[in-house]
Image: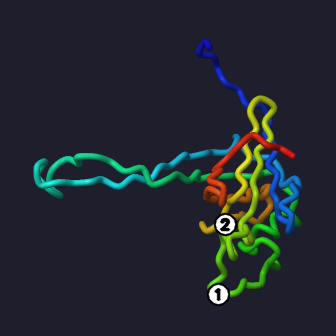
Amino acid sequence: MAAIINVAGATPVSVGTGSAGALEPLGYTRDGCSLTFESFVYEVHSDDYGGESGPPIDIQYMGETVRIRLELTKYDEAVADKIRCRLRGGTAGTVGATGSLMLSSNGVTSLAYRICLISPTRPLNFPICVFKEPIEINKGTKFSTLVLDGTAYRNSSGLLWDTTTA
């Protein structure tokens, strides 16, 4: 395959906020969304390479996450409220139960969100996403921008992302 200029096109953002993870449209970003695919590794050190002060003798792969940054200038306020409560199924403005497990409850996904970026060329679906970073919004005469930073995690089957849009 030849190297080409890649243009995803207008990419609506949808969020799975209900108990079954069914998608509802959230909105559109200012200049697209930003995705950072981050791996986690552990360096293995040994005395024959100088111990902790020397280079590793090997590197263990420990998994990955994806950081998702959305700056939305056109969005559904009611759907945004479902994310603002941080725990899927919660109520905006009401703090959730302290100690809630966000990724799983008895091995079943419970309080995390599904995020789907439905671009015409290559959609991306993240089944498990947590919004633990600060949520920003400006209020005033100028249009409001909602900034959401989430982190996608693998699900119980090991899936971090796929191209499912249904």
Picture layout, residue 128 above or below residue 39: below
Residue 135 disc label: 2
N-term mark: 2 or 1: 1
- Is residue 2 found left or right of 32 in the rendered image? left
Which residue in the rendered view is the most extreme toward the top?
Answer: 2
**Circle 2: element type:** loop
Which residue in the rendered view is the most extreme toward the bottom?
Answer: 98
Q: Quadrant of the N terminus?
A: top right
Who is closer to the viewer here, 93 or 102? 102
Who is closer to the viewer here, 74 or 130? 130
Picture layout, residue 110 above or below residue 129: below
Where does the image place residue 83, in percent across and percent down from the top left?
A: 76, 67
Q: Amino acid at mark 1?
A: Thr
Where does the image place residue 10, in percent across and percent down from the top left?
A: 80, 35
- Using a 10 Å C-alpha cutoff, classify the residue at mark 1 as few (fewer than 14 neighbours), some (14 to 19) or many (20 or more): few
| Residue on which disc 1 sits | 98
Residue 122 disc label: none
Q: Amino acid at mark 2?
A: Ile
- Is residue 126 found left or right of 143 in the rendered image? left
Picture layout, residue 2 above or below residue 77: above
Nearest-to-viewer mark from 2 and 1: 1
**Colour scheme of the rendered structure:** rainbow
- Is residue 71 found left or right of 67 in the rendered image? right
Q: CA distance from mark 2 to mark 1?
A: 19 Å
